[in-house]
Image: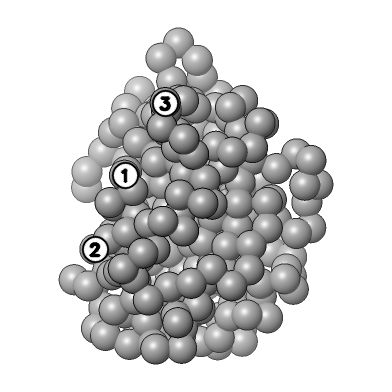
């Protein structure tokens, strides 16, 4: 198994054997990854977008399976994760269809028109690394979803003042663009450097040009959160 301190720490947490923190590092700056808060606990209903999703659903970057466990009670849900540790954790927790795979290689993983909905909540979209990468992801997602599909995605929003305070933030001289760059460490194991491409909602709309997706709704922050504290946008896409 390739080095995966991130997935290993979350799995150890699930198994109740984690004795050290999962640390995110950006040069000399560090923060402790909030594993329990971000990946476990009870998934609360979010009517603003829960009602827009139908099965089969593709849960991209599914983590420890909190969303997949919630949605599979209603319709078929496939949870995709690149980490073998996380796939094992999801299966332990009762996710019925947890698969190891790369969300940026969807055409190699699934056939055409496989899913009615797709969900990627947690700013995983930024790992496309570039605006060209985001456009390619949207094109690939269009292939594996039905003609009437819905997708719900989020990303950090450089157009919001508070986003500059996000851990590992890097400004970009280009309007509406930024980066995050950091890596994870756990029990002396160092993960690969993660490069996130951050883009404003306007620049995201530009990336959709040439794909069949259209933004039909959006919010800054999740609708049940304080908009004044928002650092991310959330979008609902449909094909059109």
- Residue 193: image quadrant is top left
* SS for dot 1: loop
Image marks 1 and 3: residues in contact by CB distance under 8 Å: no
Assess disc 2: are there few (<14), some (14-19) or many (≥20) residues with their C-alpha within 10 Å of its C-alpha.
Answer: few
* SS for dot 2: loop
Of callouts 2 and 3, the N-terminal one:
2
- Residue receiving disc 3: 173
Q: From mark 2 to mark 1, how far is it between C-alphas?
A: 15 Å
Of callouts 2 and 1, the N-terminal one:
2
* SS for dot 3: loop
Assess disc 1: are there few (<14), some (14-19) or many (≥20) residues with their C-alpha within 10 Å of its C-alpha.
Answer: some
Residue at screen point 77% across, 47% down: 227
Mark toward the viewer: 2 or 3: 3
187 versus 227 height, above or below: above
141 versus 173 height, above or below: below
Residue at screen point 75% across, 39% down: 229
Nearer-the-camera pick, 1 or 234: 234
Of callouts 1 and 3, the N-terminal one:
1
- Residue receiving disc 1: 130
Disc assigned to residue 105: 2
Residue 181 on image: x %, y % = 39, 29
- Residue 130: image quadrant is top left
Placement of the C terminus among the 4 image quadrants: bottom left
Residue at screen point 46% across, 88% down: 148
């Amino acid at each position: 198994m390739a080095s995966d301190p991130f997935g290993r720490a979350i799995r150890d947490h699930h198994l109740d054997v984690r004795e050290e923190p999962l640390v995110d590092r950006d040069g000399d700056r560090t923060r402790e990854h909030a594993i329990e808060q971000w990946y476990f606990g009870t998934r609360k209903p979010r009517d603003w977008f829960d009602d827009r999703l139908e099965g089969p659903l593709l849960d991209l970057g599914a983590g420890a399976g909190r969303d997949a466990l919630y949605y599979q009670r209603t319709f078929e849900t496939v949870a995709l994760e690149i980490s073998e540790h996380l796939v094992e954790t999801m299966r332990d927790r009762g996710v019925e269809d947890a698969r190891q795979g790369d969300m940026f290689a969807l055409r190699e993983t699934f056939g055409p028109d496989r899913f009615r909905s797709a969900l990627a909540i947690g700013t995983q979209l930024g790992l496309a690394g570039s605006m060209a990468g985001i456009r390619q992801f949207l094109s690939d997602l269009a292939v594996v979803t039905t003609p009437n599909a819905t997708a719900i995605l989020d990303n950090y929003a450089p157009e919001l003042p508070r986003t500059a305070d996000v851990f590992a933030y890097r400004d970009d001289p280009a309007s509406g663009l930024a980066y995050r760059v950091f890596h994870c460490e756990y029990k002396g194991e160092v993960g690969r450097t993660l490069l996130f491409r951050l883009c404003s909602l306007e620049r995201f709309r530009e990336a959709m040009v040439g794909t069949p997706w259209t933004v039909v709704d959006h919010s800054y922050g999740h609708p049940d959160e304080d908009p004044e504290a928002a650092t991310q946008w959330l979008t609902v896409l449909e094909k059109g």
